[in-house]
Image (tube, grey):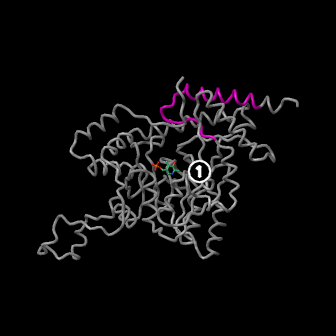
Amino acid sequence: MNPLPYGRHDISEEDIAAVVACLRSDRLTQGPRVAAFEEALREATGAKYAIAVSNGTAALHIGALSLGLSKGDVGITSAITFVASANAIRYAGADVELVDVDPATGLMDIDDLSKEVARLESEGRPPKLIVPVDLAGQPADLPAIRAIADACGARVLEDAAHSFGATHTHQGAVHRVGDGRFAQGTTLSFHPVKHITTGEGGALLTNDDAVADTARRLRTHGISYDLAARAKDHDGPDDPFSGPWLYEQELLGFNYRLTDIQCALGLSQMTRFPAFLARRRSLAARYDGAFAEESFAGLLRPLRKEAGRSGAYHLYVVQVVAGKGEPLASVAARRKRLYLFLKERGILAQIHYIPVSRQPFHRATGERPLPGALAYYAASLSLPLFPAMEDADLERVLMALGDWAAIERAATTRPS
Ligand SMILES: *Cc1c(COP(=O)(O)O)cnc(C)c1O
């Protein structure tokens, strides 16, 4: 049997035809498909602006810069995330501070965020940017995070690499991730394991005119071709050194462009995005149903779902249940047994994520205790979940989990 990964892309014949059509056209980059893909992203999220870039990390980088993060500032992110969320803060020349997570959701712990902001304020270095992460596809508590950010003068850049298509309810209104109601910037990733793919790709969403304008220039070397608006700065038609060829670099930008070839794939994938999302949710509901059964009681449980939030399920995370007072190393050992047991059966689960504070590069930021992140890390495992996963694949995972549960139960109930 083929190994079953935790996630993978789904490419159709239509996707292939769309890419081939682009290859036969006269624009391979910066052509009409980029704008059309951005339009599709705006429509799907309700964002005023979408800026497509070469990957999700680039989106975080230009998002942080466009929101004003600069050298010597402090940026905050969650201790449980992919390293890119923290790295983007460092690319901007700022220091990273990590906030703990709720171990039952993996989402930024609001009390710990308040405490960390107060600590930074007392040191005279209030944060300028907060980067919450919608782990596994469930939105973080954006209204609470925005309120804390407003009170300390920070802006919010939501890392929505996991949550494209998710919604949350606030005061009776349903908000789509990326609609800009709470986060001044939101980033997406189109890496093949994510909701839709462009091979590599990402986007920054924002409703702020100035942020969008800066981000667009940062995407292309900091260059602006739109000189009409500043025609008065030039000597006019009589200046022999100026003319229609003029472009101006005003910022230190990058080449973070997404190609038309990639956007052709992205546009085609967007036509199936609703079906992808529905399939992820349906598979997640089947996992939820299984973990509600007696056979898994006290052994495995899904992440806690917060009221009013509808996840987009980039990941399906299950946790081994800790006994009362059980040391973390014992919980982690059980999770490792489960990981290896599944691997033996050709089921390639994954762990999302090792706390950022445990990475050698970021270790200096890990001086505050992060008990929630450690508990989350010890217990969590991402099970296979992707749109092309078949019902039989799900049965195979549940069968293996059932066998593991029976062995664990026998081991704990055996008289010693
Ligand atoms: C995938 C991912 C990113 C970065 O995306 P790339 O497109 O791979 O650069 C950032 N943050 C999180 C949480 C992710 O899962």
- Residue 231 at what x, y percent from top left? 21, 73
Image quarter of residue 130: bottom right
Name the residue at 15% across, 75% down. Answer: 236
- Residue 62 at what x, y percent from top left? 42, 60
- Residue 302 at what x, y percent from top left? 65, 41
Residue 159, placed above or below residue 214? above
3 vs 67, left or right, is: right
Q: Which residues are magenta?
A: 381-408
Residue 184, placed above or below residue 279? below
Main secondary structure found in the magenta portion: helix
Q: Which residue is mark 1?
A: 308
Image quarter of residue 338: top right
Task: Tell me the kind of residue under disc 1.
Answer: Gly
Badge 1 marks a residue whose secondary structure is: loop
Q: Nearer the viewer, residue 308 or 126?
A: 126
Q: Nearer the viewer, residue 95 or 215?
A: 95
